[in-house]
Amino acid sequence: MINELILDFEKIFGDKMGVEAYFAPGRVNLIGEYTDFNGGHVFPCALTFGTYAVARKREDKLVRLYSKNFDQLGIIEFNVDELMNKKEHGWANYPKGVIWAFNQEGFSIEKGFEVLFYGDIPNGAGLSSSASIEVATSVVIKDLFNLDLDMIKMVQISKLAENKFIGVNCGIMDQFAIGMGKENCAVLLDTNTLKYIYSEIDLVDASIVIANTNKRRGLADSKYNERRAECESALKDLQSELNIKSLGELTEEEFEKNKHLIKNNIDAKRAKHAVYENQRTIKAVEALKQNDFETFGLLMNASHVSLRDDFEVTGEELDTLVELSWKQKGVIGSRMTGAGFGGCTVSIVKNDCIDDFIKNVGEAYAEKIGYGASFYVAKIGDGARKLS
Ligand code: GLA
């Protein structure tokens, strides 16, 4: 793969002198959805597919970016002194935003560079193709300019790019999982403190199966920012009597006792999801530690129901996939993953039932929705890194 990408770099940029190669994975979240901007817990893992980058520094101020996934756009060029989000730059606004965010954080990037990107994450599928390209760019910049910063700082810089340059008010889960992921482990992250622990995922005779609805979704044009605002409004109402900084601080009982403080019914539903989902995530990780896969699966299912009924971020395609999955033999749990509104589901399926699962769910989904879903048996890989 890398050798082929280096040859592509040579074709696009003229020669391959001094290039280096880098990789940042995609991620799948097992449980803990829409808890990250509410100070709750998340439990994602990095995947083995992701974004490759082949890069080298330039001596002038020009940045030249090329993506094999968008080759019709050709090389996108801009100056390091002119970092504006431009619609016609499309995907390249993500790496551009990362350069901007490095500058914001006091690492002034004064020289240009050129990068060839290639990603094997399906775009817009909720597996974080955009966070993957952001973290890949952070790793490229750190290495090319020999900067002194650790992975958590790169994760924060990548998130800043997404929040302030792209305009999606996301939490830190995606960039964190991509930067800090570890082979065969999921990361339990407390988004309030950024404390994290790795939890080995040994599902014995089962695997993680990702199913893509193939309904395209862009975070910026989804209702993501609206959900965040609703949670913030609920928190504000609760703070009229409670001394809390985030919804993640509440137990289910505390929420039930105080939910009358939330003035708007919709805000109350969103907050209920955030509180219960955070507690579910803690319980799920505990169950996994005890090898209690059944409880883990039931909590995944409950997570989906809450995202469907209270948080309202699923939609017909995701609900169809999940509801079909629940009916299949050998399915331990199934839910939507990521931001929802399309994108992917994550299921835990017994290995000897995976073929039938894919066949049965695939056929019934296509019949109901009118186009097919795609399935991947996921492998959990390491976080972002330099390859050469
Ligand atoms: C997107 C965001 C994350 C998180 C999830 C929902 O992936 O980027 O920060 O909020 O949605 O859990």
Image: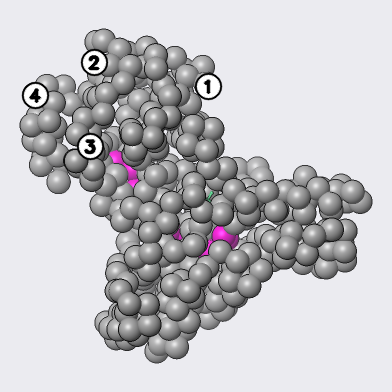
The residue where tag 1 is placed is 105
Is residue 260 covered in magenta? no
Circle number at residue 73: 3
Residue 189 percent across, percent down from the top left: 57, 50
Q: Residue drawn 30% across and 12% down?
A: 61
The residue where tag 4 is placed is 14
Q: Earlier in the sequence, mark 3 or mark 4?
A: 4
* The quarter of the displayed image where residue 265 is located: bottom right
Q: Residue drawn 11% across and 21% down?
A: 17
On the picture, is 370 further left or further right than 265? left
Q: Which residues are magenta?
A: 23-33
Disc 2, disc 1: CB below 8 Å? no
The residue where tag 2 is placed is 58
Foreground mark, 1 or 4, reads 4
Foreground mark, 3 or 4, reads 3
Is residue 25 covered in magenta? yes
Whether the residue under disc 3 has CB within 8 Å of ligand 1: no
Q: For the residue marked with disc 3, what is the amino acid?
A: Leu
Circle number at residue 68: none
Q: For the residue marked with disc 1, what is the amino acid?
A: Glu
On the picture, is 132 further left or further right than 301? left
Visible residue check, residue 146:
yes
